[in-house]
Amino acid sequence: MRLVTKSREACLSAVETYNRASAMYREETFAILMINAWELLLKARIMRENGGKASSLYEFRHRRKKDGNASKLKEIKKTRCGAPMTIGLDRACNLVAGYTRDRVDQSCIANIDALLEIRDSATHFVAPDALLKKTLTEISLASVRNYVIAAQQWFGVTFSDLNIASIPLSFDLDQKEVEAVARKSSNAVVRFLTHMEILRIKAIADESDFAFSVRVNFDLIKNKDDTAIKAAIVNADPDLTISVESDKVPAGFDWTYQILLSKLTERYSDLKQNPAFHAIMTPLRANSKFCYHRYLNPTTKSGGKKAFFSPNVIKEFDAHYTRKPPTLFEPAET
């Protein structure tokens, strides 16, 4: 579906802008592009729920009688050039939030509202502010994470062409600097951060796949640990290591084996769980880019392992199986 393709392009453009260190107006440009990505994705979902009818996205208004009063009859609202006007982002969020399955929840909607506030408040952020930068980064990280989850759930969109399990956002945060300037923020920044905190509190609800913001913490440990991932650091202590907690499944490895099988069944018409299938699976299970193995007891590394797969692995099966015919919402790849 063209809307889904354009939405994905907007998301990737947003991330590329954010990751470009020399980019000017970075956070604000990211918010504008990410809002566009979300709006297109939500509208594509609404169209699919309504049988692909474009009219499901149109904005309607009451006609006017000759005497100027509103009629009971409605007509399509038009843009300045006469094209049908479509519903806004708020309306699209509310519609998708009302669906019975795979819907957006309050955490996701609050994050989108935060993006809108970043866009609308951009002119007030004249001076650099460390606390503001930290908040913008955490909201931006969550918005990309939420988008990837929704795109995969709704349309099976993958990002395998980027050779990454999830889309990273580069950032440079100094917690000490944040704490030092927290009390020196401008009034405009303080108002913005207060509003962000209100949105965050509203987003606290039941367990959700979506998040309002994402916080990334790095613990630098100055000791030798054979289980840690070695980091090459110029002019630093050679024993410096970065340890990854082994009891947590890394972000981007969201599919269990059962979920992977269901996705493969949906995608291919001739899939069979036979020896040939398992021969394909064996090297993929051993590839850390596609599969993460978690011990059932990570402390003692015992009790067997459970495999978690990246959605990017699905592309590896295209050379072995026949894809089902394209539909309106999943066109053939070029």
Image: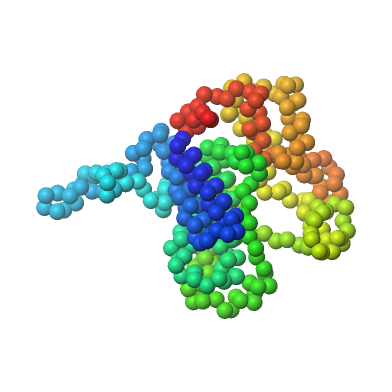
Q: Can residue 262 be spotted in the picture?
A: no
State the residue in front, 137 or 170.
Answer: 170
Query: Image height check: is 310 above or below 137?
Result: above
Question: Is residue 56 toward the left or the right of residue 274 in the image?
Answer: left
Q: Residue 264, percent across and down?
A: 62, 29
Q: Looking at this rendering, what residue extends furthest in the left direction?
A: 67
Q: Residue at x 53, y 49 (%)?
A: 13
Q: How many marks?
A: 0
Could you say which quadrant of the image residue 233 lies in? Answer: bottom right
Task: Answer left or right for 247 relative to 118.
Answer: right
Q: Position of residue 302 (x, y in %)?
A: 85, 44
Q: Is residue 51 visible?
A: yes
Question: Is residue 52 placed above or below 20 in the rendered structure?
Answer: above
Residue 296 point in image, percent of width and height: 79, 44
Q: Colour scheme of this structure image? A: rainbow
Where residue 315 appears, x then y in whole percent? 63, 32
Q: Is residue 155 left or right of residue 226?
A: left
What residue is at 34 percent from the left and 39 percent from the top?
55
| Residue located at (63% from left, 72% from top) | 178
Relative to 24, is 222 on the left or the right?
right
Q: Residue at x 11, y 52 (%)?
A: 67
